Amino acid sequence: MPRDTALSTSNLTHRYGDLTVLADLSLDVAVGDLTAVVGPNGAGKSTLLRVAAGLETPAEGEVARPDPDRGHGVGYLPQAFTPRAEFTVAETVAYFEAAVEAGPDPERLLDRVGLAGVADRQVGALSGGMRRLLGLAVASVGDPALLVLDEPTSGLDPTMTRRVFEAGSALADDGRAVLVATHDLRAVERDADRVVLLDRGRVRVDGRDVERLAARYESTVEADSGTTVREGAR
């Protein structure tokens, strides 16, 4: 794997029973980039991210991840992040730091995602957006070279969506690779360095002209059958 590449996948195929969710998929994710994976529901985005994070093993193909000697390799934020409500924000980060024998340095991680001012607040009192930012801080525990974020802004208002993406972009600028699955095309246009359009388990479009590619996805996605899938029909 090239030195500036945090994740490299080659000819990935993955199935759930008779359903093929990834089909001969190859993708490299570079250090310093926030790479956004977009596509309709059922496109294979979450499966790709779980394979990237090492939570699932593909039926076929190869995956090269960061050297575990660099930080803790991969940080993963699932769609459902449910920390204990009675813990404070700082206690939550410290708990995960202890679990992976990293730190402890919750203040630094919370400052990085803009939560330093609520370090002593209980998780149960946080807004949904602040919980996602907390999840991003937890995924960053151990300074992983690759951050994998699955729909981190789903259901959030525009202000909190912007904060989450800006935090992710800052983490990429700090020398990490960030791979994020999302439906939020405005955030992609504003903050992503690269966009990958996934449909029916295949990469349809991959490039750095983010605004043009996001607009192309927003209008239509041409499926193999010749039918058109509207982005709004998720």
Image (cartoon, rainbow, N blue to C red):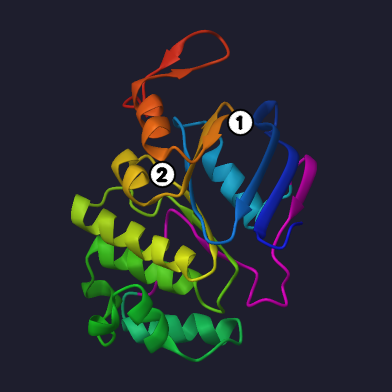
Q: Is residue 63 magenta?
A: yes
> Which label belongs to residue 158?
none
Position of residue 90 relative to residue 183, above or below, is below
Position of residue 29 relative to residue 10, above or below, is below
Q: Earlier in the sequence, mark 2 or mark 1?
A: 2
Q: Label 2 is placed on what type of residue? A: Thr
Quarter the N terminus occupies: bottom right
Q: Position of residue 56 (x, y in %)?
A: 68, 51
x 48%, y 63%: residue: 172
| Badge 2 element | loop
Q: Is residue 56 magenta?
A: no
Position of residue 222 relative to residue 27, above or below, is above
Where is mark 2, residue-wise?
Answer: 182
Q: Position of residue 31 (x, y in %)?
A: 58, 61
Q: Using the numbered discs, state the Cα–Cα distance from disc 2 to disc 1 in whole angstroms.
A: 15 Å
Q: Position of residue 169 (x, y in %)?
A: 40, 60
Position of residue 96 relative to residue 213, above or below, is below
Quarter the C terminus occupies: top left
Q: Label 1 is placed on what type of residue? A: Gly
Q: Position of residue 55 (x, y in %)?
A: 65, 56
Give the residues in magenta. 58-84
Where is mark 1, residue-wise?
Answer: 201
